[in-house]
């Protein structure tokens, strides 16, 4: 085991889209676990759009990072040292740690992973927090019924790609918005979506929806916001359900944008719009983990990860989320097996 660990910290708060000088790489001694803790040698690190909100100095559903704080996110790796009876050195686990070579976690907050079901990066995507978000967001908030038309924005991302596949397993027609021909082809050819719309190639989203979902929209899973969501609201059926998971189109806005006023359409349709946070389902995470693992193991759900090599490139991987660089889950490979 090394004597030192690299660690990314927030160097300054961004204004608009973050730039590389918002991040600073430090070197420190490898942290030592205390009673009940484990030291993890990080193999893979997750970068996620919600982290942009933690870079602001304002209240939100996640506490903001202070300038100088280490950046935090999902990690998967090996137990390098243990002060807990729950895990032994060499065990493969996942949890929420720091953007670092080594991170200390409370053993109670760590989950064992099974590399026989899927490679380790999948436990930061479909078999991790994004997968649980898709599971509860669609099934509990979206309440899909067989024959429903489900529309997903950000459909080629970690959450959206899983949402669409779960909807298909529930007998729905699924339409996804994504940002390239490669992504839309992946949705329809590999994941089983019934239709996919390349929002970079189409200007009239409402017309594109009319072609892809002529019967209207029963469930909308929103990861994006902006003009796509404006268009979907005009196509909602009576008693439609809208699950608001993310608004990446607005995460770098300095002022709250004022778009077309769509709320009046909810009166006629009696549609329900509900925001969701996966942590609200914390007592049921094992349920989602087990079911997602079965679907992946049986080949019913396909997952994909875009892997950026090297901890030193973690900020680039994060910024790539806003450029749409990733297909599936964006992760950083921090280290290879010893």
Image (spheres, rainbow, N blue to C red):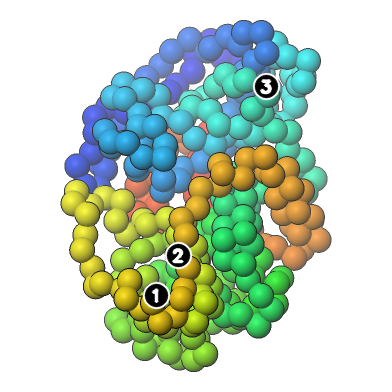
Q: Which tag, 2 or 1, sits closer to the chain's start?
A: 1
Viewer-closest of 172 and 160:
172
Q: Please state if 115 lies on the left or on the right of 144 as rendered.
A: right
Question: To which residue does mark 3 refer?
Answer: 107
Q: Residue at x 65, y 18 (%)?
A: 38
Against 97, residue 3 (above or below) is above
Q: CA distance from mark 3 to mark 1?
A: 46 Å
- In 3D space, how far apart are the residues under numbered discs 3 and 2 (Cα atoms)? 37 Å
Residue at figure coordinates x 54%, y 36% from the top left = 74
Secondary structure under the numbered disc 1 in the rendered image = helix
User: Does any portion of residue 185 appear in the rendered image?
Assistant: no
Q: Quadrant of the N terminus?
A: top right
Quadrant location of residue 142?
bottom right
Question: Could you classify mark 3 by the number of other residues whose Cα lies within 10 Å: few (under 14), some (14-19), or many (20 or more)?
Answer: many
Q: Which residue matches tag 2?
A: 273
Badge 3 or badge 1: first in the primary sequence = 3
Q: What x and y, as percent, mark residue 13? A: 24, 33
Q: Position of residue 48 (x, y in %)?
A: 45, 46
Task: Say what secondary structure mark 2 lies in.
Answer: strand
List x then y, in percent, for residue 261. Answer: 25, 72
- Pointer 2 with pointer 1, Cβ within 8 A: yes
Name the residue carrying label 1: 266
| Badge count | 3
Give residue 188's mark. Answer: none
Relative to residue 325, is residue 234 depicted above or below? below
Give the vertical position of 151 relative to 19 (above or below).
Answer: below
Q: Is residue 78 left or right of residue 208?
A: right
Residue 134 location, x and y as percent? 58, 57
Question: Could you tell me if residue 51 is visible in this image?
Answer: yes
Badge 3 element: helix
């Amino acid at each position: 085991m090394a004597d030192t660990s690299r660690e990314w910290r927030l160097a300054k708060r961004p204004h608009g889209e973050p730039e590389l000088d918002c991040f600073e790489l430090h070197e420190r001694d490898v942290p030592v676990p205390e009673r009940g803790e484990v030291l993890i040698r990080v193999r893979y690190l997750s970068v996620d759009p919600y982290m942009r909100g933690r870079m602001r100095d304002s209240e939100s559903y996640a506490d903001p990072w202070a300038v100088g704080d280490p950046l935090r996110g999902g990690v998967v790796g090996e137990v390098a040292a243990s002060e807990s009876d729950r895990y032994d050195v060499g065990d493969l686990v996942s949890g929420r740690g720091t953007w670092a070579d080594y991170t200390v976690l409370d053993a109670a907050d760590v989950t064992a992973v099974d590399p026989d079901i899927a490679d380790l990066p999948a436990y930061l995507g479909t078999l991790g927090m994004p997968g649980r978000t898709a599971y509860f967001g669609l099934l509990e908030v979206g309440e899909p019924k067989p024959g429903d038309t489900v529309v997903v924005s950000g459909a080629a991302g970690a959450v959206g790609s899983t949402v669409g596949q779960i909807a298909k397993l529930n007998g729905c027609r699924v339409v996804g918005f994504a940002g390239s021909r490669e992504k839309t082809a992946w949705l329809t050819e590999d994941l089983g979506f019934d239709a996919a719309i390349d929002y970079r190639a189409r200007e009239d989203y409402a017309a594109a929806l009319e072609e892809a979902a002529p019967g209207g929209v029963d469930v909308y899973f929103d990861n994006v916001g902006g003009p796509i969501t404006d268009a979907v609201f005009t196509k909602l059926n009576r008693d439609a359900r809208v699950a608001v998971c993310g608004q990446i189109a607005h995460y770098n806005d300095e002022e709250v944008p004022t778009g077309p006023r769509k709320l009046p359409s909810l009166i006629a349709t009696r549609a329900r719009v509900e925001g969701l946070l996966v942590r609200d389902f914390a007592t049921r995470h094992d349920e989602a983990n087990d079911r997602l693992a079965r679907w992946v193991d049986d080949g019913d759900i396909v997952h994909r990860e875009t892997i950026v090599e090297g901890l030193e490139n973690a900020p680039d991987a994060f910024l790539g989320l806003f450029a749409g660089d990733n297909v599936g889950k964006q992760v950083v490979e921090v280290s290879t097996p010893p």
